[in-house]
Image (cartoon, grey):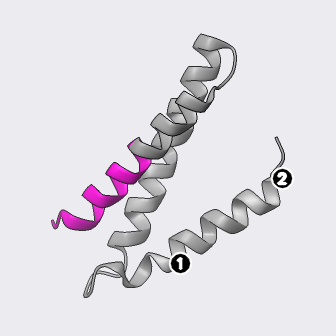
Amino acid sequence: GTAGPVALAAGAIAVVLLAVPAVPGRPWQGPLAVVAAIAVALLLLTHVVRRLGGITGDVLGATVEVVTTLVYLGLVLSG
């Protein structure tokens, strides 16, 4: 609750833009991987808040691990 929505949006946009050169020849693949991972994180956090009534440090850690893994997979998989 300490970071506002503007900071969250600015950070997400910065990461998406930094992901553009991540895959040479495919400027769309990095941002797509980041956006997909963020969507999964939001779904996971929504589910956890509904089931547990809030989030814990363990939930945040697990979310970071899931998002990192999804971004890595999105960057290495080529269509």
Q: On the rendered image, what quadrant is the N terminus found in? A: top right
Counting residues from the N terminus, which is met first, the one under dot 1 or under dot 2?
2
Q: Position of residue 38 (x, y in %)?
A: 51, 50
- In the image: residue 75, left or right of residue 2: left
In the image, what residue occupies the spot 71% across and 68% down? 10
Question: Does 9 appear above or below 48?
Answer: below
In the image, what residue occupies the spot 52% across and 70% down? 16
- In the image: residue 63, left or right of residue 10: left
Determine if the magenta segment contains residue 6: no
Q: Which residue is mark 2?
A: 4
Q: Position of residue 6 (x, y in %)?
A: 81, 61
- In the image: residue 70, left or right of residue 35: left
In the image, what residue occupies the spot 62% across and 13% down? 52
Which region shows up in magenta?
66-79
How many residues crowd mark 1 within 10 Å: few (<14), some (14–19), many (20+)?
some
Determine if the magenta segment contains residue 74: yes
Disc 2 residue type? Gly
Q: Which residue is mark 1?
A: 17
Q: Mainly helix, strand or loop, the magenta region?
A: helix
Q: On the rendered image, what quadrant is the C terminus found in? A: bottom left
